[in-house]
Amino acid sequence: MLTSLLDLLLPAPCAGCGAPGALLCPSCRALLTGLRGYPAAPRPAPAGLPPVHACTAYRDPVRQLLLAHKERGALGLAGPLGAVLAEAVRAALAQAPPPEHPVLLVPMPSARRAVRARGHDATRRLARSAARRLRRHGLPCQVAPVLRPARRVADQAGLGAAERRANLHRALTVPELFRESLSGRQLVLVDDLVTTGATLGEAARALRAAGAPPVAAATLAATTR
């Protein structure tokens, strides 16, 4: 409520394009509303990467909106960005059989130090927003944050595809207490962005090792490589 009141008294410029008057201007909102999912697996794709769908290329204004939500705490963007992620999930599941149980969205885990620095887990917040959107549109859906770091990894910035894969090799795990709840469910990996696919590929490996292979992956954006 306080954030909404401050937005009324001191309206921020649009986080996407800088237009005055609102955190998300009408033009950027219309852009997000019009996005639909498409196959977006990187080339070459890492071994074991499930089919990936995204809704747009990682460029402005979507790039700025994602950064504002993740790095600058613009939590008011979680709703519209989560709606875009929901479209990517919908596209990713288009060829899958109807689920017998609620679909589980498995967000990529954020490093604890990053969550502390940002004050929130951006990927989990977007996953929850997407799940609410999908439920409103008739798809039973829950968020399952079951992935955990198995070891420390180096910063991915500046690493090439092969270096990222090596850096993330066996870096994720699914704790034993979560494994039974995943059995027989349709799992979709979700993240804000796919670049080389190394993170999603390692997450898929960890889920397969836990006996719960994901059927697909969905992201808001994809880099053009």
Image (cartoon, helix red, strand yellow):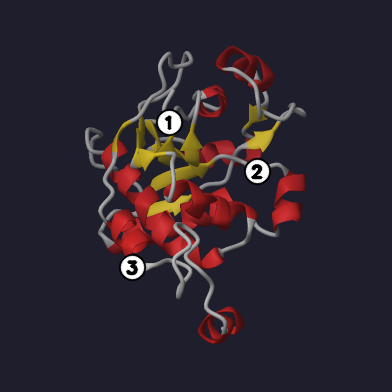
SS at mark 1? loop
Q: Quadrant of the C terminus?
A: top left
Is any atom of residue 213 visible in this view?
A: yes
Q: Amino acid at mark 2?
A: Ser
Which residue corresponds to mark 1? 214
Q: Is residue 141 above or below residue 26?
A: above
Is any atom of residue 121 visible in this view?
A: no
Q: Quadrant of the N terminus?
A: bottom right
* Crowd class of label 3 (few under 14; some 14 to 19; many from 20; radius 10 Å): few
Q: Residue at position x 36%, y 56% from top?
A: 83
SS at mark 3? helix
Q: Is residue 120 above or below residue 45?
A: below
Q: Are marks 2 and 1 in contact (CB under 8 Å)?
A: no
Residue 41 placement, left or right of 4: left
SS at mark 2? loop
Which residue corresponds to mark 3? 26
* Crowd class of label 1 (few under 14; some 14 to 19; many from 20; radius 10 Å): many
Which mark lies nearer to you, 2 or 1?
A: 2
Q: Amino acid at mark 1?
A: Pro
Which mark lies nearer to you, 3 or 1?
A: 3
Which residue corresponds to mark 2? 110
Q: Earlier in the sequence, mark 3 or mark 1?
A: 3
Q: Residue at position x 55%, y 57% from top?
A: 69
Q: Are marks 3 and 1 in contact (CB under 8 Å)?
A: no
Q: CA distance from mark 3 to mark 1?
A: 36 Å
Q: Residue at position x 77%, y 46% from top?
A: 113
Q: CA distance from mark 3 to mark 2?
A: 31 Å
**Where's residue 158, x and y in %?**
65, 25
